[in-house]
Image (cartoon, grey):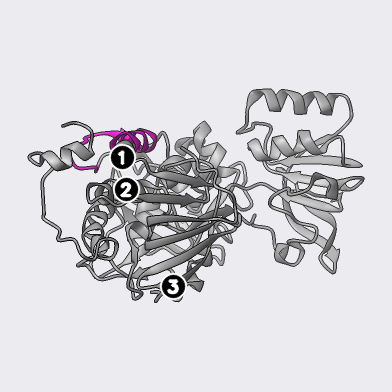
Amino acid sequence: MLDRTPMTEAIKTDVLIIGAGPCGLFAVFELGLLDMKTHLVDILDKIGGQCAELYPEKPIYDIPGIPYCTGQSLVADLMKQIKPFGPQFHLQEMIETIEKIGDPLFRVTTDQGKVFEAKVVVIAAGGGSFQPKRPPIKGIEAYEGTSVHYAVRKMEQFRDKRVLIVGGGDSALDWTLNLAPIASHLTLLHRRDQFRAAPDSVNKMMSLVGEGKIDFVLGQVTTLEGANGQVSKAIVKRNDGSNFEIACDALLPFFGLTMKLGPVTNWGLELKDDEYIPVNTADFETNIPGIFAIGDINWYPGKLKLILSGFHEGALMAQKAHRYVYPDKKLTFQYTTSSTSLQKKLGVA
Amino acid sequence: MANITYIGPDGTVRTVDGELGSTVMETAIKNNVPGIEAECGGACACATCHVYVDEAWTEKVGGPSPMEEDMLDFGYDVKPNSRLSCQIKVTNELEGLVLRIPERQA
């Protein structure tokens, strides 16, 4: 289902949905019933947004008619529900620009160079895009991009460097294993000797430690020393409160993901508290006609950040979106229970 | 109800009533105790309701579950008496509980 269109050619779609969380997914259903085709873009490597990333196994009790489900099972069921409409997913991509080129028609680009032309844009981006979390180390900003990196783009840049990796999850372990042969010296630092990572990676890391190829050290970085963006050492606090130093040329902290609004702020949309996109409650359209916002990212008087509210918002949004996609068609309201035409679209009639 | 005392990083002491069955995080939020953010709303999916349990109480409160321990990896200045306050339920046994709030949340 993943789209493999070449980067330069614009992908034409009725509706582009930003965010593949529960609200973005259910919007596919409501838009699909009204014959609108959808493409979805999400920065995560999986479908489901916060439900998949933050609480796949956690219980949800407030979806109407579903007394109990988990984040993951809700996503799986939504995927089943929207399957008849053939949504196209573009994962691990972040929308960078939205430009109005028609009435309404939008040209939308991603950080991977993909281009979309959509009659309607629906922002269902929740708390924003998931980005690496900055660890709570004083003054770390001064080194970011120069000697502190939250992702590895080119392994070669760490050749013959003294690398300090901090964290205890899969990213920290994977990069420890990958960079061990390249770095002149590699230290993995974690606050405890338990890991949130694949046992196989932990075993491999431990055998590298056993062979004397890398160091594994317990503690937490408190401060960094260096100059002009170049880190020279990390001051590390042991669990007993005493301090020691680790000399390093590069620091790679892996502290999980956090949500940031990101490029949304550059699209000419009104914002509330620099955090939310104001919409009206008749159709959940923003201040730019043709751009809608549904789910946790929008704001209106009485707003509640509930999945069920996002579902409702998607249904009303689709009614207005239909006017942009099919300006000449009259929309008759129908129920899936009784309408043969809707049931045909769902593949059940 | 159980009395819970939160001591801020600057030494400010706040004692509030905790409703039995609610969590120490919820009690803090309800009473506007500063320094507890609880970004994820109590799902044990972040580490922004981090507290230090007073040494006299660590045994009664108990230690973190493996999942909570995983989340504490993201905390700031995590210590042996660190807990996520959304994972501590207010009970009669915790009447008088004393907690310290770290200098910052993750």
Frontmost residue, A13 versus B10: A13
On what subunit does the disc labeled 1 rest? Answer: A
Q: Which mark is residue A28?
A: 2
Residue A178 lies, in percent from the top left, at: 78, 35
N-term-proximal mark, 3 vs 1: 1
Task: Please say if A301 is above or below A244.
Answer: below
Residue A129 lies, in percent from the top left, at: 50, 56
Q: State the residue at coordinates (43%, 46%).
A: A50
Q: Which range of residues does the magenta coloring cover?
A: A62-82
> Element type at marker 3?
strand
Q: State the residue at coordinates (53%, 51%).
A: A43
Q: Which mark is residue A340?
A: none
Disc 1 target residue: A82
Q: Are marks 3 and 1 on the same chain?
A: yes
The quarter holding residue A181 reads top right
The Cα atoms of the two marked residues, 3 and 1, are separated by 28 Å
The Cα atoms of the two marked residues, 3 and 2, are separated by 22 Å
Q: Amino acid at mark 2?
A: Val
Frontmost residue, A330 versus A304: A330
Disc 3 target residue: A100
> Element type at marker 2?
helix
The quarter holding residue B29 reads bottom left
Q: Residues within 10 Å of mark 3 (few under 14, many from 20)?
A: some
On what subunit does the disc labeled 2 rest? Answer: A
Q: Is residue A69 magenta?
A: yes
Q: Nearer the viewer, mark 3 or mark 1?
A: 3
